[in-house]
Image (tube, rainbow, N blue to C red):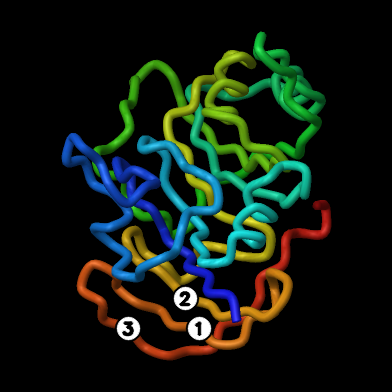
Amino acid sequence: MSRVILFNKPYGVLTQFTDADGRPTLADYIPIPKVYAAGRLDADSEGLVVLTDDGALQTRIADPRHKLAKRYLVQVDGLPTDAALHKLKTGVDLGDFRTRPCQVFRIDEPAGLWPRNPPIRYRAAIPTSWLEIVLREGKNRQVRRMTASAGFPTLRLIRWQVGEWTLEGLAPGQWREIEISGQPGSMQRVNVSNASKNRGVINTLPIHKLKETL
């Protein structure tokens, strides 16, 4: 059995277990030894971090060659135009690389979303809006660089889904442990815990599929 941890990373937490400067890390939330993050999420981003004790599975999740879809909820400055969305969808030249085509949708503000701490900056004269962006790659600060290049800087970034795994039912700082055999998606046992206090309940959760347009 491979162990998989789904963690809702709060804003400001580093995707690593140690930090010489004493900043918050995964170790402050996840009391499980010998699991490692499959890919990173910037300190100023929130949402799903997948950890595992299986090196091959870690590579499959993190390596863009496997084209595992990652879905982001993105709050941006302004109201993106159709031309801006087209630019994001078809690929953005960021200088050091050109992004692959991806999926981008305008969405309403996600219902039930937790408040960010600290809050984003608001400007009275400029509205904000939400996008859903689905990538099958993940270079450093890619989503932020993409929206900035299109003229709509990212204010808040939440990774909601990796492959079939989502944040559903996880508050910031909570984690869910899944034991799988073989490939991601064959969930067998789920343990939902408040990692900072290591309290939890046993429960069986459904597998949530990506929308049909993916």
Q: Is residue 26 above or below residue 82?
A: below
Mark 1 in CB contact with mark 3 (< 8 angstroms): no
Near-viewer residue (25 or 160): 25
Q: Is residue 92 left or right of residue 108?
A: right
What mark, if any, has residue 190 been given in the picture? Answer: 1
Nearest to N terminus: mark 1 or mark 2 = 2
Q: Residues within 10 Å of mark 2 (few under 14, many from 20)?
A: many
Mark 2 or 3, nearer chain start:
2
Q: Position of residue 106 (x, y in %)?
A: 66, 38
In terms of sequence position, does the residue under pointer 1 or pointer 3 come before the other? 1
Q: Which mark's residue is nearer the viewer, 2 or 3? A: 2
Q: Amino acid at mark 1?
A: Val
The correct choice, above or below, for 55 with respect to 148 in the image is: below
Residue at position x 67%, y 65% in the image: 164
Spatial CA distance of label 1 from label 3 is 10 Å
Tell me which corner region of the image, top left, top right, bottom left or bottom right, holds residue 92: top right
The residue lying at 73 percent from left, 60 percent from top is 210
Which one is in front, 115 or 63? Answer: 63
Q: Which residue is mark 2?
A: 177
Q: Quadrant of residue 137?
A: top right
Spatial distance from mark 2 to mark 3, Cα to Cα? 10 Å
Residue 111: mark in rendering? none
Is disc 1 in contact with disc 2, using a CB cutoff of under 8 Å? yes
Give the residue type at disc 3: Gly
**Residue corresponding to mark 3:** 200
Q: Is residue 167 left or right of residue 161?
A: left
* CA distance for labels 1 and 2: 6 Å
Q: How many marks?
A: 3
